[in-house]
Image (cartoon, rainbow, N blue to C red):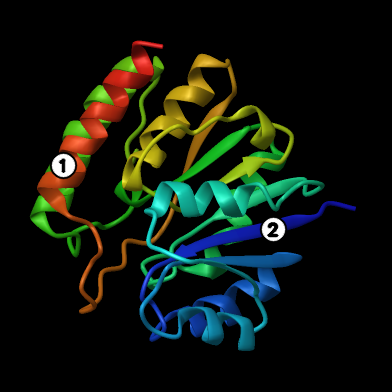
Amino acid sequence: MMKSAAVIPGYNVSKTIGEVVRRTLPMVDQVIVVDDGSQDNTAEVARESGALTITLEENTGKANATRVGLRRCEGFDVVVTLDGDLQHCPEEIPALIEGVMDGAQLCIGSRFFNDHSSMPFGSRFSNRVASWIISLLAGQRITDPQSGFRALDGRIVPELELRAERYAIEHVMILEAARKGFTIKEVPISCIYGSEQSNVRVLQDTCRVVYDILRFISR
């Protein structure tokens, strides 16, 4: 019987993590929340909502929090990653899992297959630039390389080093999967943006992403 897990890295998302966990639980066998040194009660809310919760003592960035969560997923056939701020719709997890069951080893949820007019201009622009670069390097069209809503074949998780910082992990995961010859697929997901302040630092994270991509291709 297929076993699935969801990894949710979170930083100061106590207002939303409870709902994310409760909506994710019916979709997978286990929900793992990695509290990335939050200054609020993210860990407590996640735990009370039913998630296996890992608490990091300090804020280390999304990339490290994701790696920590993935290391706890040994034995699962499919591992899903999503954010804890309600930008991803947990009810769409089955579509990602189906992509893996149909043969993809990395299935990315793309916001660009549906209406994405709610996406801020800055995010839309940076994603288009990243899409061009990542598609070129990966050797196939990737419409939404910045999407953190994705599913992985559990067998490839131990093979991914994912040496990146903060939000660059999404790009490096694609490039590493492509370099290793894994099958990559995209499926449509909703584009959701609320009023909560994002933890993305546009200029700094863009520079960090470029640095990590250059470091990856130089290896």
Mark 2 lies on a secondary structure that is strand
Q: Would you place residue 157 above or below residue 194 in this image?
A: above
Residue indicated by mark 1: 126
Mark 1 lies on a secondary structure that is helix
* Residue in the foreground of this view, choosing between 124 and 55: 55
Dividing the picture into quarters, in which one does residue 194 lie? Answer: bottom left
Q: Residue furthest right?
A: 1
Q: Residues within 10 Å of mark 1 (few under 14, many from 20)?
A: some
Image point (67%, 74%), residue name: 25
Q: Would you place residue 61 above or below residue 170 in this image?
A: below
Could you tell whether 43 is left or right of 100 in the image? left
Residue indicated by mark 2: 5
Q: Distance from label 1 to label 2 (Cα)? A: 30 Å
Image point (23%, 26%), residue name: 132
Q: Residue furthest front?
A: 57
Q: Residues within 10 Å of mark 2 (few under 14, many from 20)?
A: many
Amino acid on which the number 1 mark rests in the picture? Ser
Residue 138 screen position, x and y as percent:
40, 19
Residue 112 screen position, x and y as percent:
30, 47
Amino acid on which the number 2 mark rests in the picture? Ala
* Residue in the foreground of this view, choosing between 162 and 126: 162
The mark nearer the N terminus, 1 or 2, is 2
User: Which of the image's four quarters has the C terminus?
Assistant: top left
Image point (30%, 25%), residue name: 213
Residue 181 screen position, x and y as percent:
58, 15
Could you tell whether 25 is left or right of 77 in the image? left
* Residue in the foreground of this view, choosing between 157 and 121: 157
Could you tell whether 9 is left or right of 213 in the image? right
